[in-house]
Image (tube, rainbow, N blue to C red):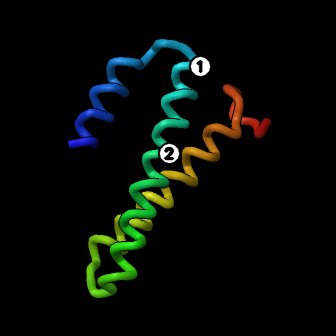
Amino acid sequence: MWNLGTLVTTIGLTGSGAEVDRAQARGFAVLSTLFGINHLVAAVQCPRSISNGSGALVNAAGVAVGAIGLCCDRSGAAG
């Protein structure tokens, strides 16, 4: 259900300005980090679980994309 809440928040805040976008990206990076850790711990406890391993990888990718986005200014240059 958190995915639905995230989607509603994203749509509701679209066009609210750069600072709101950055705050939202920081929040999503934190969520992805926490969910990724949760999936990683579960994957270690149950190595045969494909969903936990893939969940950890997907969340790690989300953290990476979020970090890249937060390190870039509007023009896309690192800053």
- Residue at the right extreme of this rendering: 79
Considering every residue shown, the one lying at the far top of the view is 16
Name the residue rendered at 50%, 45% in the picture: 30
Q: Is residue 48 above or below residue 62?
A: below
Question: Would residue 15 be found to the left or right of residue 50 on screen?
Answer: right
Mark 1 is on which residue type? Glu
Q: Which x, y percent locates residue 41?
A: 40, 72
Name the amino acid, label 2: Val
Q: Give the side of residue 21 with respect to residue 2, left or right.
A: right
- Circle 1 — which element? helix
Name the front one of labels 2 and 1.
Answer: 2
Disc 2 + disc 1, Cβ < 8 Å: no
Q: Is residue 50 above or below residue 18?
A: below
In x, y percent, where is residue 46? 30, 83
Q: Which residue matches tag 2?
A: 30
Which quadrant holds the C terminus?
top right
Pick whichever of labels 2 and 1 is earlier in the sequence. Answer: 1
**Distance from Cα at disc 2 to Cα at disc 1:** 17 Å
Secondary structure beneath label 2: helix
- Residue 76, image quadrant: top right
Q: Residue at x 39, y 81 (%)?
A: 44
* Viewer-proximal residue among 41 and 48: 41
Quarter-of-image position of residue 7:
top left
- Quadrant assignment for the N terminus: top left
Category of crowding for the residue at label 2, using alpha-carbon neighbours closer than 10 angstroms: few (below 14), some (14–19), many (at least 20): some
Residue 74: which disc?
none
Up the image or down, 13 lies above or below 6; here it is above
Res. 19 mark: 1
Residue displayed at 43% across by 58% down: 59
* Residue in the picture at 44% in, 54% down: 34
